[in-house]
Amino acid sequence: MTARTSDIEKAADVLRAGGLVALPTETVYGLGANAEDPAAVARIFQVKGRPPSHPLIVHIAGAELLGDWVEDVPETARLLAERFWPGPLTLVLRRGRRVPLEATGGLETVAVRVPGHPVALALLSAFGGGVTAPSANRFGHVSPTTADHVRAEFGGAVDFVLDGGPCAVGVESTIVDATGQTPTVLRPGGVTREDLEALLGRPPAVHTTSRIRVPGQHPSHYAPRARVVLVEPEKVVAEAELAQELGHRVGVLLPPAFTDAPVNAHAVVPVPGSAAAYARGLYGFLRELDRRGCDLIVASLPTEEGLGLAIANRLRRAAGPRPAA
Ligand code: AMP
Ligand code: MG
């Protein structure tokens, strides 16, 4: 879907006026504000219920603008940007002076990305500046991959929702710390480890568990209302049926090898065989199982290669221990 030109102009006006715009990207929908307007950026944290120490990603219209937002562009960062932008790769670099500390959670580094969605790029060009945008969901909840998901999360709390159709990638960007000598993956995402290795000529370092840069982050994230339990693929059906018999309303993410099996559960979603289709559908599946009233979701992890690594990362965190109510 392509948003109308008048909608893009309206969204750019809302950003200029310090408002919040939900915008489509190829990964997930973002909740965007003018990156250079600290009050607008503060509203993102307020609307999401996100702790202000959690840094945001600054979205820009093209790789050639990167130097405007960071202190310097090391050679590896330039290579990564040239190869993967526009696309689902976020680079963490030293903060340029125009980026307020509100957008970086007080850090001297900033995360920057050029999104690969025509509507996002049109908005960034019309607006003319950078747009800080985390995923357009309440903190800790499942990310949105359609405009309807965003409306279901926030209702009227967002000034304008720009509809660009369903997101093509469906999981967030890969975040790479490119400040040092060795690029380090901080979060797996739409650009795979294999893609990075092919460009760099060696596997990138991966540090997704030492989340020191995101203080106080809870292990539970990307979480539906229903509790999520992960088991081996061949145990999904038995585990689901047992829980259903014990009185749960069980939702099942049924692994591809078992999609012919009849399952006694409240709701069953057959998982697509391709990792790309699974990534595209994942958050919608979790939302669907919530909508159908499941209180428990039984799932298994896909093979952790290609996009499977990002899917497994999101499922693990969706299954992580929840904060006490
Ligand atoms: P999201 O939660 O999808 O908006 O993605 C934002 C994530 O980007 C944060 O939770 C951090 O993990 C990461 N991030 C953003 N800025 C930085 C930074 N300066 N250093 C390290 N990680 C960052
Ligand atoms: Mg998020």
Image (cartoon, rainbow, N blue to C red):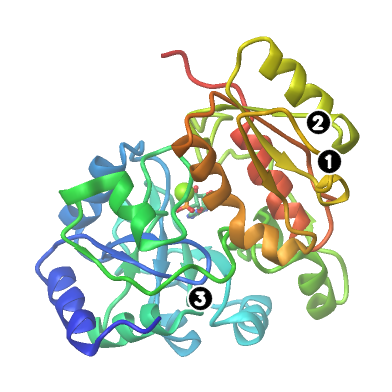
Q: Which element type, helix, strand or loop, lies under badge 1?
A: loop
Return the mark for residue 237: 2
| Amino acid on which disc 3 is placed | Asp
> Going 60% across and 57% down the picture, which residue do you hit?
281
| Amino acid on which disc 1 is placed | Ala
Can residue 294 be seen from the camera position used here? yes
Image marks 3 and 1: residues in contact by CB distance under 8 Å: no
Name the N-terminal-most of marks 2 and 1: 2
Tell me if residue 78 comes above or below residue 146 in the rendering: below
Measuring from the top left, give residue 246's x and y in whole percent.
67, 9
Q: Which element type, helix, strand or loop, lies under badge 2?
A: helix
Where, quadrant-wise, is the N terminus in this rendering? bottom left
Name the N-terminal-most of marks 3 and 1: 3
> Going 81% across and 31% down the picture, which residue do you hit?
237
Name the residue tied to disc 1. Answer: 261
In this rendering, which labeled residue sits more in front, label 2 or label 3? 2
Name the residue tied to disc 3. Answer: 72
- In the rendered image, the residue lying farthest to the top is 246
Relative to 162, 91 lies left or right: right
